Amino acid sequence: MICHSLLETIQFGEILGSHLRAGDVIALRGHLGIGKTQLVHGIAKTYLNADVHVCSPSFTIINQYEANGRSIHHLDLYRLSTLEELESTGYWDIIEDPNALILIEWLEQVDRADPIDFVTIDIRFTDETGDLSASPREFMLLGQGELYERLKPLF
Ligand SMILES: Nc1ncnc2c1ncn2[C@@H]1O[C@H](COP(=O)(O)OP(=O)(O)OP(=O)(O)O)[C@@H](O)[C@H]1O
Ligand SMILES: [Mg+2]
C-alpha cells in the first residue's frame, strides 16, 4: 500500500482501524517522522469512533485513548534502552490487556520486548532522492497468524 500524502496515510489508518479488535498488537516500524503516529491517528478515529487527540508518547512512553467503551494503548519505546526500564512501566500487563488495542512505535529499540503475538507494519519512503518528508510512504505488513491474515487483504 502506498500513501502519497498525510491525508492518504490517515485514511489508510481509518481503514485499518475498522478491521481491528481488542487484544490485537501491532508494531509500527520506520524512520523518524515517517508517519507512525499519524497512522495511529487514523486507526484511533475508526477504532474508537471518535476524534481523539493522538500525540507521540515519546516522553511518557504510553498514551491511552478511550471512547465508546473501547481503548487503545499507544506506546513509543524510542527513549528506552533496557528491558528493565521498560518493565518498570508495567509493560507486560499493558500489552497483554485483552480489552485494548495495542500499537507500539520503536519496539525494535528494546531487546527482548517482543509481544507473544503481534504483526509489524513496516513503513518506507519510496523516494529517497529529494526531500524525504515529501516522499510517498509505502506500508508493508509483516508477521503471521490470524491478525496477519485478517489485515493482509488491506495492503
Ligand atoms: N504520506 C505521508 N504519510 C504520513 N505523514 C506524512 C506524509 N507526508 C508527509 N507527512 C508528514 O510526516 C510527519 C509524520 O510524523 P509522525 O509523527 O507521524 O512520524 P513518526 O513516524 O511517528 O515519527 P517518530 O519516530 O519521531 O515518532 C508529519 O509531520 C506529516 O505531516
Ligand atoms: Mg511517532
Image (cartoon, rainbow, N blue to C red):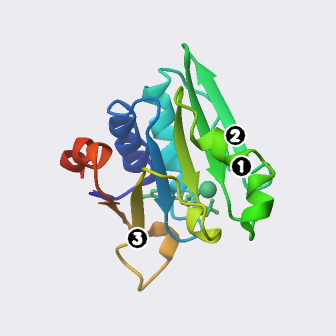
Name which residue lies at 45% across and 28% down. Answer: 47
Q: How far apart are marks 3 and 1 (CA)?
A: 21 Å
Task: Say whether residue 3 is left or right of residue 91.
Answer: left
In this rendering, the label closer to the viewer, 3 or 1: 1
Percent across and percent down for residue 91 are 69, 48
Label 2 vs 1, first from the N-terminus: 1
Ligand 2 within 8 Å of disc 1? The answer is: no
Depth order, front residue of 133/57: 57
Residue identifier under label 1: 57
Q: In which quarter of the image is residue 96?
A: top right
The amino acid at mark 1 is Pro
User: Disc 3 residue type?
Assistant: Arg
Q: In which quarter of the image is residue 110?
A: bottom right
- Picture quadrant of ligand 2: bottom right
Q: Nearer the viewer, residue 123 or 120?
A: 120
Q: Earlier in the sequence, mark 3 or mark 1?
A: 1
Numbered circle sitting on residue 124? 3
Q: Distance between the residues labelled 3 and 2?
A: 24 Å
The residue carrying mark 3 has its beta carbon less than 8 Å from ligand 1? no
**Callout 1 secondary element:** loop
Quarter holding the N terminus is: bottom left
Label 2 crowd bin: few (<14), some (14–19), many (20+), radius 10 Å? some
Q: Quick check: 151 above or below 110?
A: above
